[in-house]
Amino acid sequence: MDLGEILTTSLTDTLGVSLPHFRVELALATTIVLVLLCRMLPVVRWLDSGLVALGGIAFALWYAWLDLRSLPGGPWPGAATGPAAVELFGGLLVFDSLTAFIRFLLCGFLVLYVVFTKVSGIPDREDGADFYTLVLGSSLGMCLMASANHLLMLFMAVEMASVPSYALAGLLKGRKASSEAALKYAVYGAGAAGIMLYGISLLAGVLGTCHLPSMAAELGRIVGEGADTGSIAVLALGGLMLAAGLAFKLSAVPFHFWCPDVFEGAAAEVGAFLSVASKAAAVALAVRVAFALGWLGDAAGATATGLADVRHFSAAVIGLMAAVTCTLGNLAAYGQTNMKRLLAYSTIAHAGYLLMGVAAAVAMLGVDPEGCRKAVTAVAFYLATYVFMNLAAFAIVAVLRNRLRSEEIASYAGLVQTNPGLVVATAAVLVSLIGLPPLAGFVSKFLVFSSLVDAITKGLERPLMLALLIVGGLNTVVSLFYYLRVLKVMTFDPPADGRVAAAAPVWLPGAYVTALVLPVVVLGVFWAGLYAVAQLAGTFAS
């Protein structure tokens, strides 16, 4: 094949196959350019950059919805005609049900998030263009994380999602805590990126490729045929280093150190973005990498045996990380006095619960397809409900910050006397984060724990799954104490100065919080519709 044929084939593939499945990212990239023009050109400076960003995100959400509906097996009427999975741009990216679901979830979150920033007042009009450019740039990287099919694209996507986040953490100019948060985040991020890149180089050096499906075939052959211990050790070390980079994005132990300090120093609006969007993209990427390196549909012989060993190793690493992350997050949250710092440790704990579902899915991968699909569905459903729960929690923090000029839990004392509606909303969100019925958080945890039970009953990684089930249950009990302590301060503790502050008008922020809390309540009872959509993401495991 000569150069002309190569260029013709590449151009045909790009225009005919890749770009039609890349519309969401193109819409976000176009929106970034438009928002920057609002800052650069005097003619259009009168435009509100937030509304421009919201319009572009609405287009991206529409394309994400069309992509979701194009997949076969959806819960809507009419037969979908789109392919189940398509490699894009020569195998760098892949479009499948997991990609479509995470894209739709991220774009839906961005719509809610931009409205949140307009309601809360951060950023101001002067910084709006810079802020939304960073948010959209990071979100674009997260969309690429969800569809990465090549280790170099994986690294670029993670960095594209991370670097704008460092600047977002320092959004509050002139505040020492905000600058310190940005510096800590950047330093930890640089270290995690270096570790991950070195792990990628080890894996690519031994396997001879960075394309994930090709890596799986070579990995299964090497492990199944009993390669020398040096190669196996390098592969294990490379895998652990790659996991370190993903754990940083997930704020999983022991790569969680940045999370509490960054959340406390950054604005609540930034914390909401990092805790929800970053979590969804990182979980999707962890699922994709674990599945890509642990299973081939047509694997046979030594390759199948080798991949079974890889799955065992992956499930053990993910499971151990899940148990430690969940436990440390819940125990450390107990003694916090700052609400944002408490929510940071809560975010860490929920990363542990999500990783439990991923570990169950990996344990059943290639052995029990139906159980594996249910586990991935549980993780997808958890992410969808987590959008509403955590965004509502940070929205409440922002509303109270604007009113009380404080983010300390002690400043919430006596709030039930002035804003009982806000206290009720807080109670619904926190109880859902605990995982108690009849709220959405209960259904999410129940589905994840059910996937662990499925693996136990079928004898797949039984000791590990049983240990995770016990750890998850105990941690749910532990989380009762620090979540309910916040409600106790709001309802029973008297204000420190003995006087209750006059009620401030919060009808617009209150309406926004109510709009977020309603799905948390409704999805605790009527969750079948969302679960049916999440099942579409689960078909990724087929």
Image (cartoon, grey):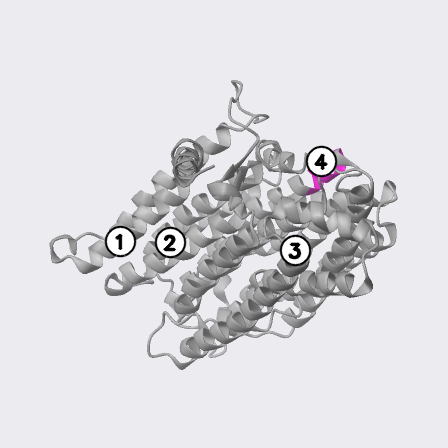
Q: What is the three-letter code of the residue carrying label 3?
A: Ile
- What is the count of numbered marks? 4
| 76 with respect to 136 (left or right) | right
Please tell me whether mark 1 or mark 4 is closer to you in this view. Answer: 4
Q: Amino acid at mark 1?
A: Val
Residue pointed to by mark 1 = 35
The percent position of residue 232, horizontal first and vertical second, equals 77, 61
How far apart in space, not on screen, are marks 4 and 3 (Cα)?
A: 38 Å
Residue labelled with disc 2: 136
Q: Residues within 10 Å of mark 3 (few under 14, many from 20)?
A: many
State the residue at coordinates (59%, 65%).
Answer: 196
- The region drawn magenta spans 370-375
In the image, residue 122 above or below residue 407? above
Q: Nearer the viewer, mark 1 or mark 3?
A: 1
- Picture residue at 78% right of the left edge, 66% below the top: 230
Q: Residues within 10 Å of mark 1 (few under 14, many from 20)?
A: many
Q: Quick one: which residue is furthest to the left in this view? A: 43
Q: Is residue 80 visible?
A: yes
Q: Which residue is mark 4?
A: 297
Can you identify the residue that label 3 sits on? 434
